[in-house]
Amino acid sequence: MSNIIMSEIFTSFQDYLHSEQNMREEIRNIVKEIEKYAREILTVLQVIHQENSGPEIGASCHKARQLFEEVRANYKKLGAVIPPGQYYRFNDHWRYVTQRLCFLAALTVFLEAGFLVSMSTVAEILGINMQAREGFHLDLEDYLMGILQLCSELARFAVNAVTSGDYNRPMEISKFVGDLNAGFRLLNLKNDSLRKRFDALKYDVKKIEEVVYDLSIRGLKPGTHSTEAPVE
């Protein structure tokens, strides 16, 4: 009798483990699709780093918006798979791609309109909820990590904009990232990964400031004149 009971107990364990394995496999497959579209969006938006890309930026943002629709569809599938109340049990599977997509959504909005996208708008773009009580949702940490990734991308963009002869863009980026830096300093960040990522922001700010300074001393900054001695 004890052997029968023991067998029943471990059979139930096996059923549970099998079900868990199947669910994780389904989650991984959906996340792979999301990752694929995230790579496509990133590729589309990399046009900003190409020389004389100005006229193409609008079309790239439009294409990115279309790809976000595919992302929304897959997040909907993902949300349907996750059991109620178990978001944080499985979120390691999609955390990093969600952070990447927050960055890409923020970059798209910045290129379109020049301001910081709100967390609620990012959630809308991705097609997921804002609040944990609503089930599958956008975590605040993922949003903030995405915004910090945006700063690094904009620092690179500032350098490449100068190469393309666009001297206004670094000014715009400098103010935007400077305001973001000031905003992040209002937060009491205790999370290790978020804190470390924030610490790297100072290097992005410095890189952008160096670009602006170089434009200023060369007289290329809008509204300034060169302070360099004339070449005889």
Image (cartoon, rainbow, N blue to C red):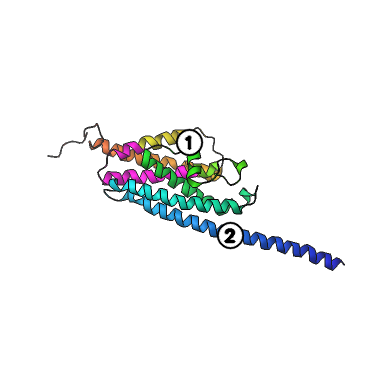
Q: Which mark is residue 26?
A: 2
Q: Position of residue 139 (x, y in %)?
A: 55, 43
> What residue sits right under mark 1 in the picture?
184
Magenta-drawn segment: 144-173
Q: Residue at x 75, y 62 (%)?
A: 12
Q: Nearer the viewer, residue 71 or 153?
A: 71
Q: Position of residue 52 (x, y in %)?
A: 26, 48
Q: How many marks?
A: 2
Which amino acid lies under the numbered mark 2 shown in the image of this protein?
Glu
The local secondary structure at tag 1 comes to helix
Q: Which mark is residue 20?
A: none
Q: Main secondary structure of the magenta part?
A: helix
Q: Residue at x 26, y 46 (%)?
A: 164
Q: Residue at x 79, y 67 (%)?
A: 7
Q: Position of residue 77 (x, y in %)?
A: 55, 54
Work out how far the residue at label 1 is from the one at label 2, CA to CA, in angstroms. Answer: 36 Å
Whether pointer 1 and pointer 2 mark residues with C-beta atoms closer than 8 Å, the reply is no
Quadrant placement of the C terminus: top left
Quadrant placement of the N terminus: bottom right
